[in-house]
Image: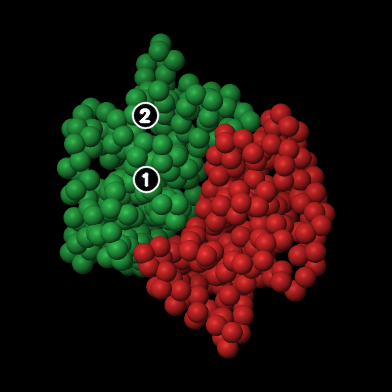
Chain colours: A green, B red
Amino acid sequence: MYDLYYWPFIPGRGEYVRLVLEAAEAPYRDVARLDPAQGGGPDAMLAMIKDAAPHRPLAPPFLVADDVTLSQTAVIVAWLGERHGLAPDLEADRLFARAIAMTTADFVDETHDTHHPLGVDRYYEEQTEAAAARAKSFREARMPKFLGWYEALLAANSAGDTALVSNRLSYADLGLFQSILGLRYAFPRRMASLMPSHPRIAALCERVAAHPNVKAYLDSPRRLAFNEDGIFRHYPELDGD
Amino acid sequence: MYDLYYWPFIPGRGEYVRLVLEAAEAPYRDVARLDPAQGGGPDAMLAMIKDAAPHRPLAPPFLVADDVTLSQTAVIVAWLGERHGLAPDLEADRLFARAIAMTTADFVDETHDTHHPLGVDRYYEEQTEAAAARAKSFREARMPKFLGWYEALLAANSAGDTALVSNRLSYADLGLFQSILGLRYAFPRRMASLMPSHPRIAALCERVAAHPNVKAYLDSPRRLAFNEDGIFRHYPELDGD
């Protein structure tokens, strides 16, 4: 049994962990979404950050498993994936999957900064002008760079283009899937113009969505919808072809 | 023998890898700093990014070791540290060291964004106003948050405050050391006001600097100076008490 800790109202970075747990059918409690009477809620999460010393996380998400406290999304998903058959077998492939997960985390950070380029300590509404400039750079330079890289990985995979590494679905694929869904939500116009030239990514996402455990999860109330408090926010003024 | 690939003119993210190699006395070639006649130079690095398929990096730094291509700073330093005795022994501690390295990578990214809040596709001089706002947020909210976290880890370490994890010098400590040097270079006024309340970090940095292999490296021509093309840039207008 795992205890996942993440903000209860947004998919955010916690969703990357949740997807691996769900795809693996690993039993877990989503602690901050539980009732405070059951020891849940955001306050229980914030208390844990301090109680977890000396392995305290800087920020959610974090995962508690028996005697281990794991933090940083890319560390958590790699550890879970390698434990639950959602990682490649070969060591060189495993190391590359870790690099992919970390690159996906960077992509998430850059997506976040499109609406908060001046800092997280003030609202989006206080930085709309800078956000427009950062979002333009993101749409025109960064989205093609990251998406082109994932597409090239699929094209170069000697085991076929059904997974980013080896021929087995891994946490790296699940992470790309979640990012693509988030980008389609946040930047529908830009994604409509970009995705036709990234057919392998699109096909991978369809396969992930059809995975029985993933499909069951996406249809369940456990899946949180994207919204404008999260990382992937749909502000039409930041989108463009 | 390792081949390290990174931009030759800045310490940047490559320096986090170089420090682990040097502290471990691991033999390596710094490929992009070699003469093109020896197969070196930035062009050799950029060619490698494409040749490394299917394990191609998105960006430098990356490290080639026999049949493995490693990318993403936090993945590289963890792998090197665990191979060369610069990592904790216990599995829970190893996983936490990985999370620290990834958090340090996030801190580096945020430092970078103080001078490029609107995007990497335009010069600092074209985004000075936004940079002033982002740097203020970084100085007042983010620097205390990150530094306070490292200091708390040292205080909470049951093996003593001589290392971030366990009682052994690790790549996590080397990363903090490099970041503190970079921040002292980029934000001397802010660091002068912050560091007195973070005495454990200061003491750790002194111990790392006195480590024989590290000291020999810092005194060598292999060590690149911080400069205004790198991540840690000294723009006095972005600094403040």
Q: Which mark is residue A8?
A: 2
Q: Residues within 10 Å of mark 2 (few under 14, many from 20)?
A: some
Q: Is residue B233 visible?
A: no
Q: Which mark is residue B189?
A: none
Kind of residue indicated by mark 2:
Pro
Q: Which mark is residue A87?
A: 1
Task: Count up the numbered dots.
Answer: 2
For residue A80, side relative to residue B227 (left or right):
left
Disc 1 secondary structure class: loop
The reply to whether callout 2 and callout 1 are in contact (CB within 8 Å) is no
Task: Identify the residue shown where x is 65% and y is 52%.
Answer: B84
Q: Chain of mark 1?
A: A
Task: Identify the residue shown where x is 59% and y is 84%.
Answer: B38
First of labels 2, 1 by sequence position: 2
Q: Quadrant of the N terminus of chain B?
A: bottom right
Indicate whether A4 appears above or below A101: above
Q: Residues within 10 Å of mark 1 (few under 14, many from 20)?
A: many
Indicate whether B64 appears above or below B192: below
Q: Chain of mark 2?
A: A
Residue B213 placement (x, y as % from top left): 77, 59
Task: Identify the residue shown where x is 41% and y is 52%.
Answer: A90
Q: CA distance from mark 2 to mark 1?
A: 27 Å
Kind of residue indicated by mark 1:
Ala
Residue A77 placement (x, y as % from top left): 41, 41
Residue B226 placement (x, y as % from top left): 68, 67
Task: Identify the residue shown where x is 69% and y is 30%.
Answer: B156
